[in-house]
Image (spheres, helix red, strand yellow):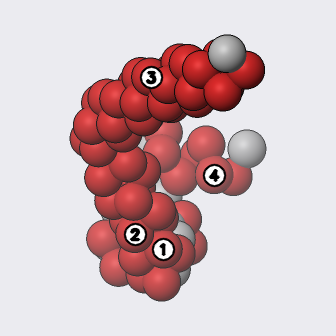
Amino acid sequence: MSELDMFTGKDQIMSAEKRMKELGHPKDLHDKLYAACQSVKTTYEELPKIVERMEQRKKVHEVCAKVMLGIAELETQ
């Protein structure tokens, strides 16, 4: 309730520095969160390219499998 009172008027005169000290988070935590968000953003932006490359590899794998089956069939003849 004391935290709620701070926002609703009882301690409304609190300075920005005091508010940060009592209610905020340390700067290193902000930096870690920012770095984590940046890596997620990068991955999110790269995801379509990764999916496309995986689809291409799947197609290449299927073609290679067909070729290998064709070779195996020719060897048996």
Look at label 1 and name its amino acid: Lys
N-terminal of the pair, mark 4 or mark 2, is 4
Look at label 4 and name its amino acid: Glu
Secondary element type, mark 3:
helix
Residue under label 2: 35
| Separation of residues labelled 2 and 1 (CA atoms) | 5 Å
Name the residue nearer the viewer: 76 or 9.
76
In front: label 4 or label 2: 2
Residue under label 3: 63
x then y, percent, for residue 37: 40, 55
Residue under label 4: 3
| Mark 1 burial class by Cα count in 10 Å: few <14, some 14-19, many 20+ | few
Residue under label 1: 32
Name the residue: 61% across, 43% down.
4
Look at label 3 and name its amino acid: Val
For the N terminus, give its image quadrant.
top right
Look at label 2 and name its amino acid: Ala
| Mark 3 burial class by Cα count in 10 Å: few <14, some 14-19, many 20+ | few
**Are the residues tagged 2 and 1 within 8 Å (C-beta)?**
yes
Snapshot quadrant of residue 75: top right
N-terminal of the pair, mark 2 or mark 3, is 2
Task: Say how many tags the image has.
Answer: 4
In front: label 1 or label 3: 3
N-terminal of the pair, mark 1 or mark 3, is 1
N-terminal of the pair, mark 4 or mark 3, is 4
